[in-house]
Amino acid sequence: MNIFGLIPILDQLVELDVSTTLYTLTTDETGYATQPLNLVAIGGQSTTYQIRAVFEGVGFKTSSLTVKDPYGRDYPVCTTMQWDFKPSQNMVTLTVEAPKTDVTSSTSDEETTVTQDDESTTATVPPPKTPEQIQQEAEQNGWLQIRRRFHYYAFGKTGSFVQA
């Protein structure tokens, strides 16, 4: 007997249906059937899984009450089916939450780093730059050149020149 005062059902098949994946399990000496599952949040979004366990039952017996018809043949008037262990099923819905993501700012100009464990993801990014810092960096790397153009009007003539 187990802790609930029940006799375990040994070596019986149990079907476990996990969101269209079917597992066929066998009960152990304690009457339990177990299956490790790797349920993950798909695409970084919370994901819901439908899990259904089915036990088909064990050892049904049939009993019939028969009478003789006018020709002397047995005629069943009632048939009863009795189960040693009745069929049963149970369903549960589990939702796997997406892991938590933390974004932190570092104090130096280091590259962005991402660390991940089973429960969370942490991204460390460099501190934000001012527009002046971005412009200076772009000019130093040759991505940006600024040429100032001046226009003038003098003595009825217009002109312009570019400062190098």
Image (spheres, rainbow, N blue to C red):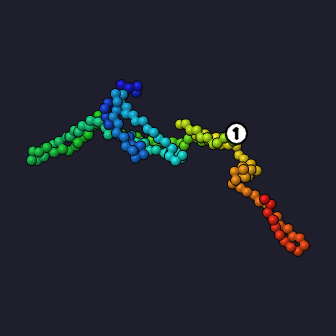
What residue sits 32% from the left and 37% below the top?
13
Q: 31 and 121: which one is in front?
A: 121
5 relative to 94, above or below = above
- Quadrant, the C terminus: bottom right
Task: State the SS at label 1.
Answer: loop
Q: Circle 1: is it few (<14), some (14-19), or many (20+) Cα within 10 Å?
A: few
Name the residue furthest left: 71
What residue sits 54% from the left and 47% below the top?
45
Q: 148 and 103: which one is in front?
A: 148
**Identity of the amino acid at label 1?**
Ser
What residue sits 38% from the left and 26% below the top?
2
Residue 11's spot in the image, x, y percent? 31, 32
Q: Residue 67: in sight, yes or no?
A: yes
Name the residue furthest front: 164
Q: 141 and 30: which one is in front?
A: 141
Name the residue furthest right: 155
Residue 83's spot in the image, x, y percent? 29, 36
Q: Residue 105: in sight, yes or no?
A: no
Residue 145's spot in the image, x, y percent? 73, 57
Say whether residue 71 is left or right of residue 21. left
Name the residue furthest bottom: 156
Q: 91 and 114: which one is in front?
A: 114
Q: Which residue is mark 1?
A: 108
